[in-house]
């Protein structure tokens, strides 16, 4: 088993059976406020969708099928697989006040509420119309999403990282380390101490050896 798999298993947090997932990370204060210890929540039934059957990814363009924004298209900004939720940029928006005090009414901000996965549909990039998709394999063995209406491949979205870098479009600069230099074996381990390696590098001959000492 790989070390990364072991670390992921060790870092996986176990939640109670009646834990209710929301839009906040489970370790945040907001999530702990919604799931206080000892409080039993009503079970929320979620349609089971296998990990390999999930077709909507962050960065996809989807069309709303139900609700007040029916017929509008937007970009998926967040995905919550525990509740079959997606958040679409600028869609299903509610307004609320934050920072309200006795003398200050607060700041009026928009807040995007989650939408069920069954209420959105992927947009085919060839004609910008909603379509049903399924996973298929190309001749090279690559797993892709294919539109059932046009039989065209729906490419996976290109998403920026938090630092603004797009891995698929990254080009190495003059100060970047190339993959060949990274994989090059440049150090040969030995049983010599650091002092002995430095002396050997500088051509210093020393035949004396320190006398053994014992702590007891």
Image (tube, grey):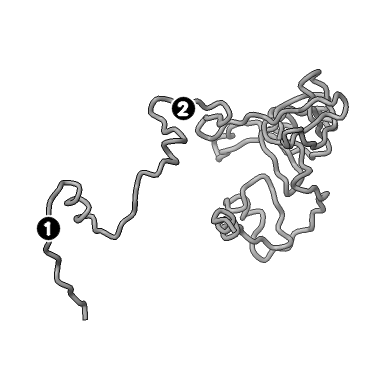
The residue closer to the viewer here, 105 or 126, is 126
> Left or right of 185: which side holds 121?
right
> Left or right of 196: which side holds 107?
right
Q: Horizontal and vertical percent for residue 194?
A: 23, 55
Residue at 12%, 54% (x, y): give it.
205
Which mark sits nearer the N-terminus, 1 or 2?
2
Residue at 72%, 46% (x, y): give it.
81
> Left or right of 50: which side holds 39?
left
Q: Residue 47 carries which label?
A: none
Query: Image quadrant for the C terminus?
Result: bottom left
> Left or right of 4: which side holds 68?
right
- Furthest residue to the top? 127
Query: Could you say which quadrant of the image residue 155 lies in?
Result: top right
Neighbourhood count class around disc 2 (C-alpha, 10 Å): few under 14, some 14–19, many 20 upward:
few
Q: Is there CB contact under 8 Å for labels 1 and 2?
A: no
Q: Horizontal and vertical percent for residue 181?
A: 41, 36
Query: Could you say which quadrant of the image residue 18 lies in?
Result: bottom right
Q: Horizontal and vertical percent for residue 21?
A: 70, 51
Q: Name the residue under label 1.
A: 206
């Amino acid at each position: 088993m790989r070390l990364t798999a072991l670390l992921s298993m060790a870092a996986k947090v176990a939640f109670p059976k009646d834990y209710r997932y929301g839009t906040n990370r489970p370790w945040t204060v907001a999530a702990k406020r919604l799931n206080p210890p000892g409080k039993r929540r009503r079970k929320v039934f979620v349609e089971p969708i296998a990990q390999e059957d999930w077709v909507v990814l962050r960065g996809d363009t989807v069309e709303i099928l139900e609700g007040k924004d029916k017929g509008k298209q937007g970009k998926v900004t967040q995905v919550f697989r525990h509740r079959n939720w997606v958040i679409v940029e600028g869609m299903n928006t509610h307004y609320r006040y934050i920072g309200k005090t006795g003398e200050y009414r607060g700041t009026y901000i928009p807040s995007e509420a989650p939408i069920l996965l069954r209420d959105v549909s992927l947009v085919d990039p060839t004609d910008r119309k909603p379509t049903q998709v399924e996973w298929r394999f190309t001749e090279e063995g690559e797993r892709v999403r294919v539109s059932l209406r046009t039989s065209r491949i729906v490419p996976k979205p290109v998403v920026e990282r938090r630092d603004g870098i797009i891995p698929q479009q990254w080009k190495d600069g003059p100060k970047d380390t190339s993959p060949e230099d990274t994989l090059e074996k440049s150090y040969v381990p030995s049983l010599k101490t650091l002092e002995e390696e430095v002396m050997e590098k500088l051509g210093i001959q020393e035949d004396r050896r320190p006398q053994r000492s014992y702590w007891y």
